Each structure stands twice: as structure tokens, then as C-alpha cells.
Image (cartoon, rainbow, N blue to C red):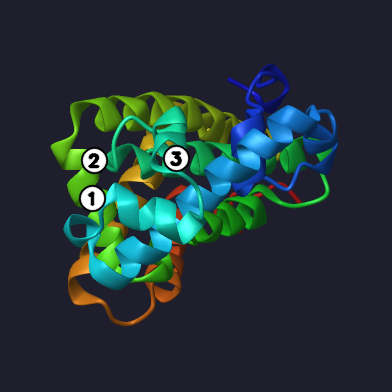
Amino acid sequence: MSISQISNLSPSSSTVALGSNSQTHSKSMSRRQRRSAETRLRLFRCALQLFAERGLQNVTVEDITEAADVGKGTFFNYFETKDHVLSVMAEIQLGKVGEAVARAKQGKQTIHALLRQLVQRLAEEPGRSPSLARAFISSFLASDSVREILKRNMLEGRKAIGGLIAEGQRRGEIDPSLKPAKVALQLLQGNLGTFLLWSLHEKPSLETWIEDTFQHFWRSIAVSSDEQEP
């Protein structure tokens, strides 16, 4: 799949409010949609802060709604359970992949730069604290419905990243003998493994861990200077 073929990877209205920088899309939302997205965002952010401070198991729905200053019934308008709050992360991450695809289509940055920026951006929310990272992991492992949401979004994101890899091959940055889909999977596997290890060791920062992982990844797929066309 090439960059030009990825045309439908655009964040939903709720995702835009949560993690996207697409002001044009946000302006196209109705007042009611914006208000709904803002409430969902407030619940998500308050929950994230509480999970980071107390741990997932020590936070109740009442704690979240009190912090967000909304009624308990409002919470269930947006989320089935407390764990489903964390499924929003999958939407945010997919929105960030969509933004990387959009920038690739503009052709102003190298694929190396775009992928490097992308992996760092994907680490922003879960990298707030190791305890929050562990909360994400435990939620995804414990809830079948949350796990299914994650799987669907990761599959869509992986296809889009495969398009970025194919574009890198077209531009002469990435080894053309590699299969884009497998390289995209390798990138996600490396990031998830790094995320898990950092949540256990806690130091140095997740940003440092991610940067090291990406540099090793890039060296394994990049066209060497000897192979590049003059």
C-alpha cells in the first residue's frame, strides 16, 4: 500500500478532540459534537491523571466523574467501564499515524524524520509515568472488549505505517527488498516491547528508550550510503 492509496485514515471527531491537531476537521464539527468531544476528553484526561497518581485498581468511576465535574451517568454515555477509558488511547495513536501520513503526502520531510517523530509522539501519553503504562498494559490484557478495540486500531495503523515504509522505499531511503507490512510490524513490535520494558525498569525516560530502539530499527532497514544512487 502506497501513501497515495491511504485516503481514509482520518481521525473521528472524538479523536480530533483527544489527540489530533486537525483544526479544519474540528471546525467542521457541530456545536453539539464539539461539546460531546470536549466532555469525553475531560473524562479521559481526569482518568489518566488519577490512574497515574493512584493506579488503575484504586480509582473508581465516581473518582473520575468528580474530578471531571460531571454526573456518574454522563460517564456511561461515553464509556462502558473504567477500563474502556484507556481504549481511547488507541484512537489517539491512530490519529497520530494519520497525521504522519498527511505530512508524508506533503513531501516536505524525509520518511526517516516522519517515523522518528511518530514513534516519539506515540509514547507521549503512556510515557507520563511507569504506573500509568502498567495500567494500560493490565487493562488491555484483562478486558476482551478493550483488547479488540486495540487490535482493530493497531491493524489500521500498521497498514498506514506500511504505506509510509513503501514511500520510503520509493524515495530511496529504505531497502526496497523488504516487505513494507513486515517492516511496519517490526516497528510496532519494537515500540511495544520497549514500552513494556520501560514500565518495569522506569529509568531512563521513555523518550530515551524509544529513541534508542528507533535508531536500531532504522539501521536495519535503511539503504546504506554505498547503495544510494549518486
Instruction: Tell me the amino acid under the disc marked 2.
Output: Phe
Decide which of 169, 101 is in the foreground and name it.
Answer: 101
Q: Viewer-nearest of labels 3 and 1?
A: 3
Contact between marks 2 and 1 (CB within 8 A): the answer is yes
Whole-percent x and y of residue 188? 38, 44
Residue 112: x and y, percent? 62, 54
Q: Dot 3 lies on which element?
A: helix
The three-letter amino acid code for the residue at tag 3 is Val
Determine which residue is flagged by label 1.
137
On the image, the x and y values in percent for residue 100 come to: 66, 43
The residue type indicated by label 1 comes to Ile
Q: Which residue is tagged 2? A: 140
Q: Is residue 213 something one can see in this rendering?
A: no
Give the residue pinned by disc 3: 88
Q: Is residue 27 left or right of residue 218?
A: right
Marked residue nearer the N-terminal end (3 or 1): 3
Binning the other alpha carbons within 10 Å of mark 1 as few (below 14), some (14 to 19) or many (20 upward) gives some
Of residue 140 and residue 173, the one placed in the foreground of this image is 140
